[in-house]
Amino acid sequence: MANTYTQLYIQFVFAVKYRKSLILPSWKDSLYKYMTGIIQNHRHKLIVINGMPDHVHILVGLHPNQSLSDLMKFAKGESSEWINKNRITPEKFYWQEGFGAFSYSRSQIKNVIHYIENQESHHQKQSFREEYIEQLKTFDIDFNEQYIFHDLL
């Protein structure tokens, strides 16, 4: 796409199926490196990645060659395939359907990086569900509680 110039910063948030705490400290860095490779191979710039045992936050400088949905399809699909192929978890690993995607201006990037890097301390004060619903409300996104990331019943 000659003469196409963009500056698109998107934070993606997605969860392990049923929000199971399967992403362990012993292999989370390897997962994050693998996901970084997937994102970079699709011509996007990964700015920061972090999360908790049950979910991941990724801040990306988005290249306009791919839709948000396609990027998440590849990132989630290829990473779960890698986890399962290498038998990293005792049970089959799945990401939950869907994701959150939130856009930011350049002036907000330092705060978003700080927020993502400090997930562990942030979640001592607020649950993932509370955090996610707060983000949806902050961005004035209509949502149905029925479709928010589900816990195992």
Image (tube, rainbow, N blue to C red):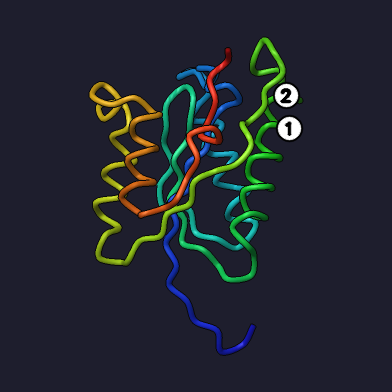
71 horizontally vs 58: left or right: right
Q: Secondary structure at mark 2?
A: helix
- Residue neighbourhood size for the residue with mark 2, other residues' Cα within 10 Å, grouped as few (<14), some (14–19), many (≥20): some
According to the picture, the residue beneath numbered tag 2 turns out to be 84
Q: Are marks 1 and 2 in contact (CB under 8 Å)?
A: yes
- Which residue: 73% across, 32% down? 81
Indicate whether 145 appears above or below 7.
Answer: above
Q: Secondary structure at mark 1?
A: helix
Indicate whether 30 appears above or below 113.
Answer: above
Extreme residue in the bottom direction: 3
Extreme residue in the right direction: 85
- Which residue: 57% across, 15% down? 152
Indicate whether 1 appears above or below 39.
Answer: below
According to the picture, the residue beneath numbered tag 1 turns out to be 81
Q: Position of residue 69 (x, y in %)?
A: 63, 54
Q: Quadrant of the C terminus?
A: top right
Q: Amino acid at mark 2?
A: Asn
Q: Position of residue 3 (x, y in %)?
A: 56, 89
- Residue neighbourhood size for the residue with mark 1, other residues' Cα within 10 Å, grouped as few (<14), some (14–19), many (≥20): some
Q: Nearer the viewer, residue 117 or 17?
A: 17
- Which residue: 51% across, 34% down? 148
16 horizontally vs 53: left or right: right
Quadrant in the rendering for residue 78: top right
How far apart in space, not on screen, are marks 1 and 2 (Cα)?
5 Å
